[in-house]
Image (tube, rainbow, N blue to C red):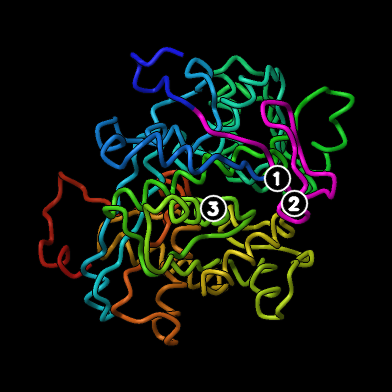
Amino acid sequence: MRHSDPYEIPTFVTHLECPATGERFEADTVQGLSSAGKPLLVRYDLDGIAASVTKTDLAGRPDGMWRYREFLPVRRTEDIVSLGESATPLVTLPRLAAEMGADEILVKDEGRLPTGSFKARGLSMAVSMAKELDLTRLAMPTNGNAGAALAAYGSRAGIDTYVFCPDDTPEVNVREIAMQGAHVWRVNGLINDCGKIVGAGKEAMGWFDVSTLKEPYRIEGKKTMGLELADQLGWQVPDVIFYPTGGGTGLIGMWKAFLELREIGWLTGPLPRMVAVQSTGCAPIVRAYDEGADHADLWENAFTIASGIRVPVAIGDFLILEAVRDSGGFAIAVSDEEIAAAQERVPATDGLLLCPEGAATFAAYERSLADGLVSPEDRVVLFNCGNGLKYPMPPAERSLDHTQPIDWESLSEE
């Protein structure tokens, strides 16, 4: 193996594993769900990683998700499919923190990634592995952003992509998916209905299903949010993470990252409390958490303005609930009214435009703070998972006639 390229480095995947049964599956082969129908997790030689790389080594590499190559599954550098996944910033909300009596509020703004959302991480990894495993046709259901990322990375890799969206998916997302080269259809149903189409078409169309957690690698891309967050905080972690939870890949992935970092000795002390944030119009994880259940039942008639968390049933439900409980966190649902209010308040106060799902995390934090679920001294990180520019905004229709006298006093009254 060549070592002149800083990214041509050893990899440490040992096998894939069913978290429900412990059954092992061979790495470097095409895998979907386990024999028990559960998501597969990638396992690594963590001792080998600890012996191979240091924090100082990472600090000498360019930032972004690919600086953590030893922790990731892609074997060959030439198989990496990238559109420039730089590290996303931690943005403070100082005026809001002062209003709420909190020491600090941090937002990890994933909207800065290619395709404008955190889905770029998971799909960059999944498409890279599809390339490495010689897959030529991929399909998925989406509420918008994941499909856009699959389309972009699939086109980059020269892989054919098929995407199915609920018919009320935001127009900008559907057009983005089409413009980036995917075959895209609107479907008269929810994301789980779209997923049934993907599953039913596997034999006839010969595509591989890259639905959330139905392949092992999107979670490894999302895991880089946890690696990157710890890196940005000097290999420390926040007290609490509020994460918008639909399929839950990012929450599961971050918790996996923190456990791996603790195993190799890079993290010591308490790990973050993981908070799953949902909408009251679609809250299967919150209901299961409140009931003490290990699995979440289908949520009927799901509806929310935060379409990214409108997931009526999640195949990784037990992994989400396990991460929330093992971390000492909780699950919370906020209303669409609270989401909309946060989406207006945060940019107007602190200048950071949020997507609806990101606004849900702010609303959840505000409620949790008021209810004593978190303290003002807790260091919290809220995840804004998409660029707010991709979503509808309230109209702004005031105008001036430059040929007429201007009533200056009225301007300040507006």
Magenta-drawn stretch contains 19: yes
Q: Looking at the image, is mark 3 or mark 1 nearer the viewer?
A: 1
Give the residue drawn at x 70%, y 17%: 136
Q: Nearer the viewer, residue 362 or 209?
A: 209
> How far separated are the C-alphas under marks 3 and 2?
16 Å
Q: As drawn, which residue projects farthest toward the bottom?
A: 371
Q: Nearer the viewer, residue 361 or 182?
A: 361
Q: Is residue 392 visible?
A: no
Q: Nearer the viewer, residue 294 or 312?
A: 294
**Mark 3 = which residue?**
256
The magenta region covers: 11-39
Give the residue drawn at x 84%, y 30%: 202
> How far separated are the C-alphas under marks 1 and 2?
6 Å
Which is nearer the N-term, disc 3 or disc 2? 2
Viewed as shown, does residue 162 lie left or right of 405? Answer: right
Amino acid identity at mark 1:
Glu
Magenta segment, principal secondary structure? Answer: loop
Is residue 66 positioned above or below 188 on the image? above
Amino acid identity at mark 2:
Gly
Amino acid identity at mark 3:
Lys
Question: Do the CB atoms of the residues marked 1 and 2 lie less than 8 Å apart?
Answer: yes
